[in-house]
Image (spheres, rainbow, N blue to C red):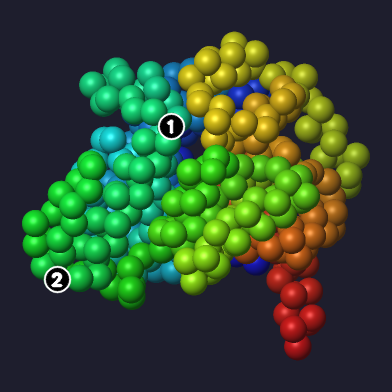
Amino acid sequence: MKFLTWGANVGGGFLRARVDQETRSDMAYNIELARLADQIGVHGILYPIRYVGRIGGSGGSAGQLDPLAVVGAVAGHTSRVRLLAAVLPGFLHPVTLAKIGATLDVISNGRFHINLVSGWFREEQEKFGIEWIEHSERYRRSEEYLQVVKGLWTRDEFAFQGKYYNIRGGSLHPKPVQKPYPAIYQGGNSEPSQRVAAKHSDVYFMNGAPVEELKRQIGTVGSLARRESRTLEYAVAAFVIARESEEEALAEYEAIIASADEEAIARFKASMDTRGMWKNAATVSDYVANNEGFRTGLIGSYEQVANKLRELEAAGVDQVLLAFRHPLKELPLFFERVEPLVNAARIRASG
């Protein structure tokens, strides 16, 4: 199983709760986190995209560093960890992304990936004059977007005519280092998002959810992908509270929920489109951790968390995107106490 973690280009922490958590988003911290991830064997770091607001519930005026620029900055400080930049199609033309992405893949020697985010935050787009288009149309645009990016990454004299983009024999050089192209991650729980992922993406990102719910999503997307003669990997978000004992982990979880920032949760609910991501969120706990991370259930002793991860792997999950209260402290502990229990067991079973 591969493990990813969140970058910190958007500050505020990953909990909508009035608790102590890491909230820094400056470049010095991002470089420190990336170096640590590179050293201990984290598969990838995802840098989110945000033009308005923050991830968690805390305030502040630090703003949001652009994920593509941050990837370029941390690439020179790392050598192994993959660097994922989230991208909003409405803000960035696919030709521009293809050019920047190929350059970043060269700079990082083949470690750049994109996470396509079709857009759920209406206010964010309208504040900057980006037309807010209907849900299914956002995914039609995303489909064209990926066709253009992949076409420019893999072909010369690429031509494309669609509703949103028209390319008349464009060619970009150099091409990405990765062949045929850098892997594309995409999320979304709606039917249009799943269809686009099955046809054009390489890793399908899921919000945190119980195993049975994840199985259904994997089954649906897998069936759609097989119709296209394609296979995907599957990734899920999870907020981790792994401690020496179950009692310690549950006590911490309950304290976090008791400190839920209701105001921040209300703002978040008002901003989102529930036809896609977060459509299954129901309780306060589902909204406290970013991307419904608590629903995945990685709360307990180190052994219990490892057992849960093996259960997720058996259900078809290939990658887990980890969030922590204090990443610099907890990420190394996870790779010391949990990761070996997961992957060593898989290696023994395959041997």
- Of the 4 image quadrants, the one containing the N terminus is bottom right
Q: Quadrant of residue 311?
A: bottom right
Which class describes the residues within 10 Å of circle 2: few (<14), some (14-19), or many (20+)? some
Q: Residue at x 40, y 47 (%)?
A: 116
Q: Residue furthest top?
A: 263
Cα–Cα span, label 1 and label 2: 32 Å
Q: Position of residue 327 (x, y in %)?
A: 59, 45
* Residue that appears at 63% across and 54% down: 220
For label 2, the residue is 156
Between disc 1 and disc 2, whose residue precedes?
Answer: 1
Q: Is residue 295 above or below residue 343?
A: above
The type of residue carrying mark 1 is: His
Pointer 1: residues within 10 angstroms few (<14), some, or many (20+)? some
Q: Is residue 251 above or below residue 272?
A: below
Where does residue 58 sit, x and y in percent of width and height? 53, 21
Looking at the picture, does residue 254 appear above or below residue 114? above
Relative placement, left or right, of 60 versus 90 is right
Mark identifier at residue 135? 1
Residue 55: tell me if it is visible: yes
Q: Residue at x 23, y 42 (%)?
A: 163
- Residue 306's disc number: none
Q: Mark 1 touching mark 2, by CB under 8 A?
A: no
For discs 1 and 2, the disc positioned in front in the rendered view: 1
Residue 69 place in picture, x, y as percent: 27, 46
SS of the residue under disc 1: helix
Query: Element under label 2?
Result: loop
